[in-house]
Amino acid sequence: MSILVTGGAGYIGAHMVLELLDAGEKVVVLDDLSTGVAAVVPENAVFVRGDAGDRTLVLRLIAEHGIEAIAHFAAKIVVPDSVADPLSYYLGNTAKSRNLIETAVRGGTQRIIFSSTAAVYGNPRQNPVGEDARPDPVSPYGRSKLMTEWMLEDAARAHGLRYVALRYFNVAGADPKGRAGQSTPRATHLIKAAVQTALGAQPYLEVFGTDYPTRDGSCLRDYIQVTDLARAHLSALAYLRDGGDSVTLNCGYGRGFSVLEVVEVVKRVSGVNFEVRLSSRRAGDPAAIIAGVERIRAELDWTPEHDDLVEIVTQALAWERRLIEQRAA
């Protein structure tokens, strides 16, 4: 029996692949390499280049590899892009997920772990925000993910599959062993962009919005280290194997840092006082969003090990230096 990881050559998916292999699991990676990097897929994982929405391909993989569970990471994730081109997000994140869920049902795969997002909450009325808060996404990205949650809920009720949907907050850092990290060249994640600026890969860092109702006017976010997040997925797999009911859970640390606070940490850790340019707000960005984490701690056997912003930034810097060295070689 194997685990199918869609988007397994991407940032978070690659870390999930590492955790699964470390745990002795058999892994099949399906990725179209639109943003993923084939080189990060370990040799002891089966790699297939293809689309997670390709029902014929996925059905064949289920049959050939005895897929017992699907960890679904493949998605488009840039909030401003979703505002500019919403239909591509409803295709990539919603329609293709619908195809994947249908194929899992047809192929007899009864367990799905879904990569959802805190963007489903929009601008929450209170923080930390719990899973029982009414979803109110303010971007097509958040809406596209919420639609997939609804499809999973309905399919589970109709067809007996079980799922865990993990609503990520802001993912950052890299594998502590240096095996993987954020490799997308034009990634928009704050810590990725900040360390690139510190290392001279871009001339300045742009901060979007300094007039939000937060302690320093910049957006407030809950940053979760990527290996901790991958291990939450591993815990979700164990939960489903033990017969756990379908559940939707926040995945964060329950505390937040502002954009300007993160910038100062990157400057301090890197030792570089890089240029920061202040710009107006971006469409689709909530002012503040912090995870309520009581439910995930209660439901899953998951204890974070890397809840430290300095450690997260240090990992991101080390990985970015490695990428720069690889390009120069």
Image: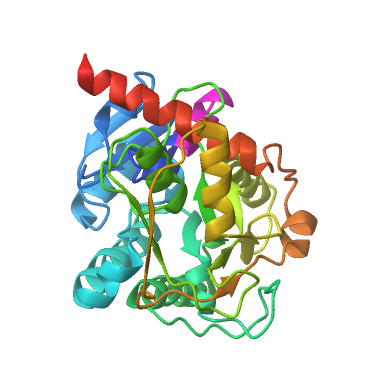
Q: Is residue 20 above or below residue 257?
A: above
Asked whether, in this view, residue 53 is left or right of residue 221, the answer is left
Identified at 65% across, 60% down, the residue is: 256
Residue placed furthest toward the top: 329
The answer to whether one can see residue 4 in this image is no
Please identify the quadrant where the C terminus is shown.
Answer: top left
Main SS of residues in magenta = helix
| Image vertical order of residue 273 relative to residue 321, above or below | below
Q: Is residue 48 left or right of residue 283?
A: left
Q: Quadrant of residue 319?
A: top left
**Relative side of 58 to 175, left or right:** left
Q: Nearer the viewer, residue 226 or 193?
A: 193
**In this orientation, does residue 300 appear?**
yes
Residue 70, given in percent of the width and then of the height, sits at: 44, 49
Q: Which residue sits at x=44%, y=72%?
A: 209
The answer to which of 247 and 213 lies nearer the viewer is 213
* Image coordinates for residue 326, horizontal then vertical, percent: 27, 19
Please say which color scheme the image uses: rainbow
Magenta stretch in the rendered image: 15-25
In magenta stretch: residue 24:
yes
| Residue 139: image location, x then y, percent | 37, 78
